[in-house]
Image: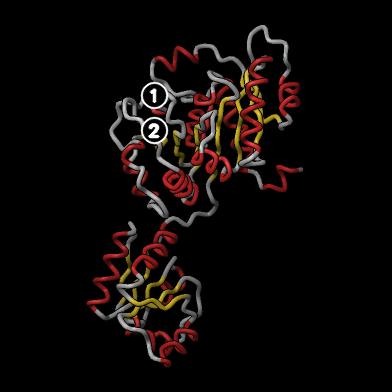
Amino acid sequence: MDRVLVLTADEVLLDDILRLVAAAGCQADVARDVRQIQARWRMAPLVLMGGDLLAAVAKAGLPRRDGTLLLCRHQPHQDGWSLAVDVGVAQVLTLPEAESVVVEALADAAETVAAPGLLIGVVAGRGGAGASVLAAALAVTAVRLGHPALALDADPLGGGIDLIFGAENESGLRWPELTEVSGRLSAVALHQALPAAYGVSILSHQRGRYCDPGMEAMLAVARTGRRAGHVVVADLPRQLGTASSALAAAADLVLVVVPAEVRACAAAGRVVDALSLATESTSVVVRTVRGAALAPDAVAGNLGLPLAGVLRTEAGLMAALQRGEAPAGRGRGPVAALSRAVLRDLRRPASRRAA
């Protein structure tokens, strides 16, 4: 991101502001004089202006702009409030009381992207349907298409999504270390803390250490990635709990992976019923099964869901997974093709998708 413009000649206030800038993972462009800052004033994503230079800014006739905060060590007098309005200050904040507000504004500025990210949930219609494989493939494909990605393991009773990436021995945090997080997180700090493979940040459960992260933690991580422009792919459990239901409700799309079999359709119907209580943004991916007579359209029609795509049998996929190679890692094959189609459709404007 561009540097935050910090405008103050008060050295004590400057120290406090720079501490907050560093805490938010931002960089500062410091100016102690309002002269010759015209370009920086216009272009900075956020301006943190000290109360000591408010009158000088008003006198300089700098243009009104969005994203200007006035930071003071004491509440300004009436004249100060009037000048703040003239300059176009969005908020007048006193330190240290309003430090959390400043950090939140800095986080917003640091993670402002041209387009928001996506949150995609993937759930199996029955056990062994291949939902975790598709979730990993979507994340890997997102990176291949030029988007940062986060694979989020939302099933505490699953095998751990890091295994599908061959990243079970990679260092980094797993869910047991993140159960207490909530609210706004730093996307940069989260990315640096998590294990990664194929360019994908991976937040997995930890084998031999069961934990239920809870709704606040799961939503905090998912929203952090989405706000920073990531494609966040959540591997959801078949039996939705409070946290996984909240993820499904927040998702741009939930994919139910269903093998083209009669019993699989019956089992998937129960999953779809549970999902309907959380979201209306559900589609079905039908996985072909050798010898099965059900057509993909028939499976989708039986479940009353739109058909997002067909996952055809991919030779060598299971062997590659056993070797620790992620699905779609080479960008070839049916899983990669389906993942590209899903992501490109979601990236199109809503008006075009609905056409």
Q: CB under 8 Å between callouts 1 and 2?
A: yes
Judged from the image, the secondary structure of the residue bearing numbered disc 2 is loop
**Relative to 223, residue 53 above or below:** below
Which color scheme does this rendered protein use? secondary structure
**Relative to 340, residue 354 above or below:** below
N-term mark: 1 or 2: 1
Labelled disc at residue 163: 1
- Residue 223 image offset from top left, x and y in percent: 48, 49
Residue type highlighted by circle 2: Ser
Residue appearing at x 49%, y 41% in the figure: 243
Residue appearing at x 50%, y 75% in the figure: 65
Labelled disc at residue 204: 2
Residue type highlighted by circle 1: Leu
Residue appearing at x 63%, y 41% in the figure: 279
- Residue 169 image offset from top left, x and y in percent: 30, 26
In the image, taking residue 32 as reference, residue 55 lies left or right, namely right
Q: Alpha carbon of mark 1 to alpha carbon of mark 2: how far?
A: 9 Å
Tell me how many marks there are. Answer: 2
In this rendering, does residue 83 appear at all?
Answer: yes
Question: Looking at the image, which is closer to me, 98 or 67?
Answer: 98
- Residue 22 image offset from top left, x and y in percent: 29, 61
- Residue 341 image offset from top left, x and y in percent: 62, 32
In this rendering, does residue 146 appear at all?
Answer: no
In the image, taking residue 65 as reference, residue 186 lies left or right, namely left
Judged from the image, the secondary structure of the residue bearing numbered disc 1 is helix
